[in-house]
Image: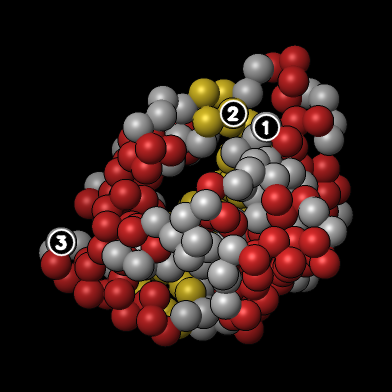
Amino acid sequence: MQKRHTDRQQYFYELAHTSEKYFIPYIKKFLDMSHSLSILEIGCGDGGNLLPFAKHGHEVVGIDISSNRIRDAVSFFEKENAEAKFICADILKFDDYKNHFDLVICHDVIEHIGNKQEMLNRIEYFMKSTGILFIAFPAWQMPFGGHQQICHSSWVSKLPYIHLLPNALYKMLLSCGGEKEDCINELIEIKSTKTTIEHFEKLISRTSLVIIERCLYLINPHYEIKFGLKPRILPRGLSNVPYLRDFFSTSCFYILRKRR
């Protein structure tokens, strides 16, 4: 397990760095951000992604089901003298802010959701008719799509593609690596909610959302602050090959809007 998974403040600032340097410039291509906007992040965690938006003067709201994450978000924003509203709630049962937001962010969340169709339908509830959704997730088959980097064992956490093993073998490997039952159960749960590019786009076709941009990364932009690796977009030829592209897409960026 990497230090950032236990040092929440470090993780907060790393997310803020990536958001400022990569998320905002990407979103600006599709949304005029020269004036104050209303912005919601679903599954905001500690709020790192939202910090740059708040510092640019936007109205910022973060929702997360974890009270611990919300408590950290409030604390970290106070230290930065940044304004935001953080709410601990289940987004599927939250009814405020109907058609309120210019931008909804859902970053590295959808792959943890069981009922993805319900989640995507729910996201539309919060968007203005002119609003956009920025959603990003790791393709399931990519080297660490199973989030095995959260393992406590240093050698297990560095093994690529092990999440693609059958469940029995995967559990055996994790157990041999000394992982505790709660970690193993979390990793198996992630495996049950996996998200492939093909599955995600099929789900979108069943909503009133339309994909207006897709960018697949060979090297995730967040890897720059984490590992010192410069982001690289997946070559166009490979990004257009269904299923094969999932093995190389460490992050999938999408911009969506409501169908008009």
First-in-chain label (3 vs 1):
3
Q: How many marks?
A: 3
Q: Which residue is mark 2?
A: 218
State the mark number for residue 248.
1
Give the amino acid type for the residue marked by disc 1 in the picture: Phe
Camera-nearest residue between 56 and 167: 167
Label 2 vs label 3, nearer the camera: 2
Front residue (pair 77, 244): 244
Q: Residue at x 50, y 61 (%)?
A: 153
In the rendered view, tell whether residue 181 sits above or below residue 218.
below
> Does the rendering let one see residue 247?
yes
Horizontal and vertical percent for residue 91? 59, 76
Coordinates of residue 17 in the picture (x, y in percent): 30, 44
Q: Give the percent coordinates (x, y) of residue 5.
A: 39, 63
Say which residue label 3 marks: 80
* Relative vertical location of residue 106 with respect to residue 83 in this rendering, above or below: above
- Above or below, comparing residue 25 to residue 83 in the picture: above
